[in-house]
Image: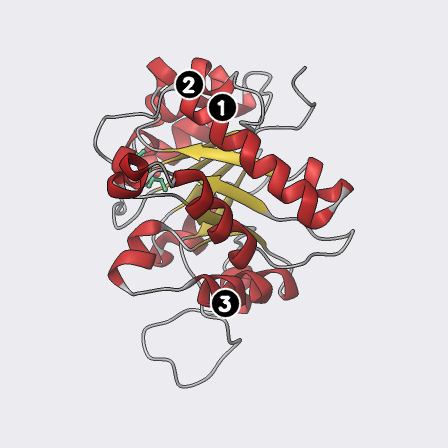
Amino acid sequence: MKKKIMPLIAGNWKMNGDAGSFLEVEVIKDRLAAQEINADVAICPPATLLHRISVALHESLAKTGAQNCHAQANGAYTGDISVPMISEAGGSYVIVGHSERRGAYNESDSDVRAKAVAALEGGIIPIVCCGESLDIRESGKAIDVVITQIINSCPDFSAEQSIVVAYEPIWAIGTGKTASVADVDEMHNAIRNALTKRFGDPGTTIKILYGGSVKPSNAKELLSVENVNGALVGGASLKADDFLGIIEAA
Ligand code: 13P
């Protein structure tokens, strides 16, 4: 039996989007207002658009989030943005530990955890990402590697706080390849067990999102897997119709 957890469909725009993207945001806002939606929704645009999109989505079901944060609240960290800044810009979530950042900026599990702690302290929900490379998948160590990432990257949290976990196999990101339903099922069960072991009862309701080439045509199948509590969507979140198709599949 699938546990009743409100799914979260989160769009990660990555380094995409400009003033023209507001047309997509308006379509999303209008269509969400016109129908019953069985999901929480978030859009994580580039930092330059966060405030404007948060304002545009004011009083909409959709929330916003950032794609990264610094662990400190302020200071001499050229180019970074902090959790209080994200919060002031209207963000409710922040993605931490995306594989593109772990890879390109050598972010370790402890870096990711420090960012997630900062998010919680600033009243923002961290979306803590994990996922294995193709080499690791083929070596048969995917579950061990991902569980270690999760355990070392997730912060403790109180009853008033919540965290979200996103499993994104690196080889499925932006490639059009998705993990098989059997692999997703196996991995999400393993993550659920690890979260429950680590956090006790609160671990049973942490949302575990799947990410990696999610699109309207495969969303229903992926979202119906036990312990898949939503999706972290890259490319397909850039077009309102595609993103709405995924939200409607939840
Ligand atoms: P795609 O949906 O483009 O594969 O990206 C997934 C992702 O990295 C979301 O964070």
Question: What is the x, y in percent for residue 32?
Answer: 52, 24
Which residue lies at the image location 33% right of the left edge and 22% below the top edge? 215
- Amino acid type, callout 3: Met
Of residues 53 and 97, the one drawn nearer to the viewer in this rendering? 97
- Amino acid type, callout 1: Asp
Task: List the residue tagged with mark 1.
Answer: 185
Of residues 13 and 96, the one drawn nearer to the viewer in this rendering? 96
Give residue 234's quadrant in the image.
top left
**Label 3 or label 2, whichever comes before in sequence order:** 3
Give residue 135's quadrant in the image.
top left
Question: What is the x, y in percent for residue 9?
Answer: 49, 31
Which residue lies at the image location 36% right of the left edge and 64% below the top edge? 107
Question: What is the x, y in percent for residue 179?
Answer: 34, 25
Which residue lies at the image location 37% right of the left edge and 71% below the top edge? 80
- Amino acid type, callout 2: Val
Q: Residues within 10 Å of mark 1 (few under 14, many from 20)?
A: some
- Residue 228 lies left or right of residue 157; in this view the side is left
Task: List the residue tagged with mark 2.
Answer: 181
**Label 1 or label 3, whichever comes before in sequence order:** 3
Where on the image, by quarter, is ligand 1? top left
Of residues 212 and 1, the one drawn nearer to the viewer in this rendering? 1
Tag 3 near tag 2, CB within 8 Å: no
Which numbered disc, 3 or 2, marks the residue closer to the eye?
2
Which element type, helix, strand or loop, lies under badge 3? helix
The alpha-carbon separation of the residues under discs 1 and 2 comes to 6 Å
The alpha-carbon separation of the residues under discs 1 and 3 comes to 37 Å
Which numbered disc, 1 or 3, marks the residue closer to the eye?
1
Name the disc covering residue 85, or none.
Answer: 3
